[in-house]
Amino acid sequence: MQNSAGVPLQDNRGYTHQPVTVSMPEQTFNDDIVFSTFNLHFCNHCCLGFCAFHNSVKARDSRMRGDFMSAQSYGFKARCLNITAFSIGVIMIICLIILIYKFQYAFYQLSSLYYYQ
């Protein structure tokens, strides 16, 4: 015998459903969009900055859709690409400074030889 109040139990008493509120923690994934924009403009070696920016936008879109697994995946890829692009950019700037110093020293040596002859 089924009671209209809910699901019947073995002793024919009705079980009423009660609303359950589940509080989930805030799903925050870092998409690094600012870091990706910086790398897109200033450290875009081998298009790593562009790829990082693309993955950051995909992570933000996935997070807005509610697909947290792909948002986390795209965010991780964006962070790795950002770090790689920034590291290559810093190494290239250091190499450029060293080359400028070496050429300046070589130019000074050549000009002093020419001047004293």
Image (cartoon, helix red, strand yellow):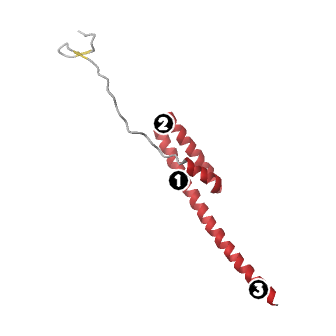
Residue wearing tag 1: 80
Above or below residue 19? Residue 26 is: below
The local crowd at label 2, few if under 14, some if 14 to 19, many if 20 or more residues have their Cα within 10 Å, is few
Residue wearing tag 2: 67
Residue 15, position in %: x, y?
24, 17
Residue wearing tag 3: 112
Quarter of the figure with the N terminus: top left
* Sooner in the amino-acid sequence: mark 3 or mark 2: 2
Distance CA(mark 2)–CA(mark 1)? 20 Å
The residue located at (54%, 38%) in the rendering is 61
Query: Which of these two is toward me, 10 or 103?
Result: 103
The residue located at (26%, 17%) in the rendering is 16
Query: Which of these two is toward me, 81 or 109?
Result: 109
* Sooner in the amino-acid sequence: mark 1 or mark 3: 1
Above or below residue 102? Residue 25 is: above
The residue located at (56%, 49%) in the rendering is 34
Distance CA(mark 3)–CA(mark 2)? 67 Å
Q: For numbered disc 3, what is the local secondary structure?
A: helix
- Name the kind of residue labelled 3 in the image: Ser
Residue 25, position in %: x, y?
38, 39
Residue 6, position in %: x, y?
27, 15
Q: Nearer the viewer, mark 3 or mark 2?
A: 3
Above or below residue 37? Residue 16 is: above
Above or below residue 75? Residue 107 is: below
In the visual, does 21 lie left or right of 110? left
Q: For numbered disc 1, what is the local secondary structure?
A: helix
